[in-house]
Image: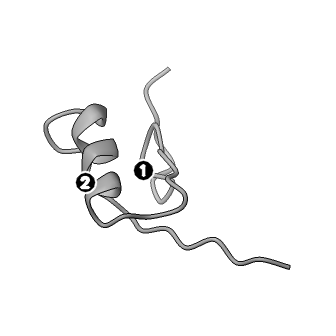
Amino acid sequence: MTLAFGSHMSASGGVDKAIARGEAIPVESLQLFSKNERQWIAKP
């Protein structure tokens, strides 16, 4: 089994900047969240 390393990146300024930040480290994986999963209320 091979482990993949990733990191939480800020999406401040746009998703494209989060991807660029991940490439700068570099990481092997990147996951994007469309909303804060710790909140019960979400906009549709």
Image x and y of residue 26, in percent: 37, 64
Identify the image quadrant of residue 43. Answer: top left
Q: Is residue 9 left or right of residue 27?
A: left
Q: Nearer the viewer, mark 1 or mark 2?
A: 2
* Cα–Cα gap, marks 1 and 2: 20 Å
The residue tagged 2 is 21
Q: Is residue 21 left or right of residue 2?
A: left
Residue at (17, 44) in percent of width and height: 12
- What residue did someone put label 1 on? 36
The one nearer the camera, 9 or 2, is 2
20 to 13, vertically: above or below: below
In the depicted structure, whether residue 22 falls above or below residue 20: below
- Taking the image as shown, residue 9 lies to the left or right of residue 34, namely left
Quadrant, the N terminus: bottom right
Q: Nearer the viewer, residue 36 or 24?
A: 24
**Which residue is rendered at x = 22% and y = 33% of the image?**
14
- Callout 2 secondary element: helix
Kind of residue at badge 2: Arg
- Residue under the image location 45 percent in, 53 percent down: 39
Q: Give the SS element for disc 1.
A: loop
